[in-house]
Image: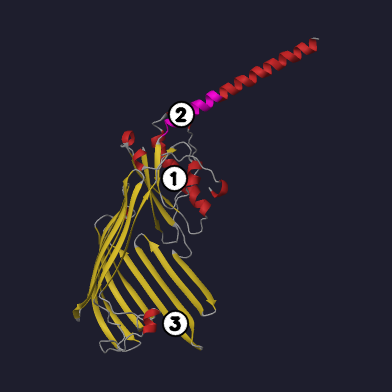
Amino acid sequence: MKINRVFMLCLFFAFCSIIALHSYAKDEDFDMDELKKSAPKAFLDCRRCDRDFIRTEIPFVNYVRHREEADVHILVTTQRTGSGGWEYTMAFIGKEDYVDIQAVLKYVTDRTDTRDDERKGLVQILKMGLAPYISRTPVAKYISILCKEELRPTAVEDKWNFWVFSVGINGSLSGEKSRNYTSLRGNFSASRVTPDMRIRMGISGNFNRSNYTIEQDDISKTISSYSDRKNFSGLFVKSISDHWSVGAWLSASSSTYSNIDLSISPVPAIEYNLFPYSQSTRRQLRFLYRVGYKFVDYEEKTIYDKNRESLLYESLSITFTVKEPWGNMSASLRGSHYFHDFKKNRLEINGYLSLRLFRGLSLNMNAGFSAIHDQLSLPGGGVSLEDTLLRRKILATSYDYGGSIGFSFTFGSVYSNVVNPRFGG
């Protein structure tokens, strides 16, 4: 009898404990839900980021889909490094109660880094950038800071002397009863990038063959098409200041499409950037002037009765790019002419705009136009119908153009904290 009473008493206390723990857990969940409401709202503006991974690794902010809802706009821009890695520039732009908190942090990957290494490093820097915003909220008392021992800065000894090499080759083929196509492409490049100097060289080749079989009235006819293009380009740039650079290009090429057997052109150049180059991931206004010499040996005699000629020319280009919370845009204007005949000239205008109009609605546009009056390589024998249809030869024109426009609109919940990868996410 005593044993039964003791057992019932223990069972009663166990039941009461379970109820108490359950109630405590509910209260704790409720408190955590309330705490999360006070967390800063972040808008992650990054094309190259693994958003699911970031939301999983940094759960102490509320992610929103519209920048208008955000307390902090994280604008992430990227550019290639000389070693083939990526440089991430993260601008933390505070809004409303956080408008006084602004910061820019950078993260650089190595070419050998895996995608996982890259995203882990990026998350580490994002956490650092978000810390000042978290510190103003009740969430701060639940955040701990881990300090890892760092190596002392030392001079880098690079056995490759900062040179990076790349080689590639690929081939493809396809066919059916009345058509077959083969293609071979190869390239080799070498580059060296330091804060004061940039060197880049590359060789590439592209060889394409197509055969078309036409059967009509029991007569079979095969039309063959081929195009070969080979190119070498070299670039040397020397930094003079945070706004000025000087350098030169050297190019050599041949193209069956352009009626060029060999073209060689050395081109010295000077560039001025209105904004410091240190701000290049956010904004640029560059003025680039080039003056060069070109020797051209043509495959066929041209419409100007030339088999080969030496030419002097100059060009000036203006390029403006900007990336801000409202979107990004770029525009360029380039003009060039030959000195022996100023009527042989070209004017090119290109532009791109991605604009966030208002919550959820974005406008994307790009357009380009060229006024062309410098086609010196046009073959004098004209272009056959087959060459025209198969695009084997360059055609005479005084202009070309292209463009596109589109809208995108998203609506619904502004929060995007949840990650669910089931069935591919």
Of the 4 image quadrants, the one containing the N terminus is top right
Identify the disc placed on residue 125. 1
Q: Is residue 368 left or right of residue 139?
A: left
Q: Which mark is residue 154?
A: none
Label 3 neighbourhood size at 10 Å, few (<14), some (14-19), many (20+)?
A: some
**Does 37 appear in magenta?**
yes
Mark 2 falls on what kind of element?
helix
Question: Measured along the vertical axis of the image, is residue 373 above or below residue 164?
Answer: below
Say whether marks 1 and 2 touch (CB < 8 Å). no
Res 226 label = 3
Of badges 1 and 2, nearer the viewer stands 2
Asked if the stretch drawn in magenta spans residue 107, the answer is no
Q: Circle 2 is placed at which residue position?
A: 35
Numbered range of the magenta stretch: 26-39
What secondary structure is marked by label 3?
A: strand
Amino acid marked by disc 1: Ile
Instruction: Give the main secondary structure of the magenta stretch.
Output: helix
Residue 123 in the image: state x and y as whole percent.
47, 45
Mark positioned earlier in the residue sequence (2 or 3): 2
Q: Is residue 306 left or right of residue 179?
A: left
Circle 2 crowding by C-alpha within 10 Å: few under 14, some 14–19, many from 20: some
The amino acid pointed to by label 3 is: Tyr
Residue 83 to residue 224: above or below:
above
- Labelled pair 1, 3 in contact (Cβ < 8 Å): no
